[in-house]
Amino acid sequence: MADLFDAEIGHVQARESRSNDKRSRILDAAIRVFAERGFHSATVAEIARAAGVADGTIYLYFKGKDDLLLRLFDEKMTGLVAEMKAAVAQERSAAEKLKRFIQLHLALVERNPELASVLIVELRQSAQFLKAADRQKLAAYVDVIAEVVRAGQESGELDRNISPATVKRAMFGALDELALGWLLGGRRAALKKTAAEVAEWLVRGLLPADGGTS
């Protein structure tokens, strides 16, 4: 009896593994197709072909193209938030934490331009995403900046008169525009140099008037 039970568990786990693998293939294929064709031009059939599955298989996991884009965003942002928090935690001062955020953000764009293109360019083409009231993953990512600023103000490292909410929007907006320009401009310049320059002058403006810590 125990052998039969173990065998059944094994079959269930194998089915789940195959299902998860197929879903991952669909998401990876969607990134490639959305980046190459654009969200509006891409079709579910093209994504299915790129993933090596039947068209109908897509609908076993996703409601349609918009839902696929939203789920892709949700899952990828979960990983990016965790990676960013871990990287920032390695730095000691508030200034260095913010510089690390800036440099890593642009490094992630340069490292995976297809994913960056989907998250930065194609999401703007989804009416469903733009209307979504719940975009917690993006908020969590940008809030890393605000959390660092608040802690830096409490420790006296950063100017207490600045607004963490304003800083996070301004800093993320600047990085988003730089990444967008790089993606749409042919990806010619090295973002690493840009990141180093931007990190220096963006963070310098947040230090206390007496100089603070760097």
Image: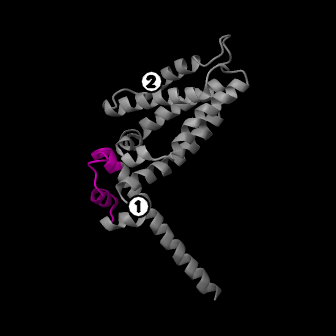
Any mark on residue 62, and which? Answer: 1
Residue 92 visible somewhere in the drawing: no
Name the residue located 34 percent from the left edge and 49 percent from the top edge.
Answer: 32
Q: Are marks 1 and 2 in contact (CB under 8 Å)?
A: no
Question: Magenta stretch?
Answer: 32-54
Q: Quadrant of the N terminus?
A: bottom right
Query: What is the count of numbered marks?
Result: 2
Q: Is residue 213 above or below residue 4?
A: above
Give me the residue at 69% from left, 29% from top.
Answer: 151
Vertically, is 17 above or below 168? below
Nearer the observer, 44 or 166: 166
Looking at the rendering, in which quadrant would you find the C terminus? Answer: top right
Residue 190 visible in the current orientation: yes
Q: Secondary structure at mark 1?
A: loop
Tell me the mark number nearer the camera, choosing from 1 and 2.
Answer: 1
* 67 horizontally vs 198: left or right: left
Q: Quadrant of residue 179?
A: top left
As drawn, 175 above or below 123 = above
**Gap between marks 1 and 2 measured at Cα:** 38 Å
Q: Any mark on residue 199, and which? A: none
**Horizontal and vertical percent for residue 159?**
65, 19
What amino acid is at disc 2?
A: Thr
Image x and y of residue 92, in percent? 68, 29
Estimate the x, y position of residue 131 in percent, counting from the top left.
Answer: 42, 45
Residue occupying image coordinates x 58% and y 36%: 143
Q: Residue furthest bottom?
A: 1
Q: Which residue is mark 2?
A: 194
Q: Main secondary structure of the magenta part?
A: helix
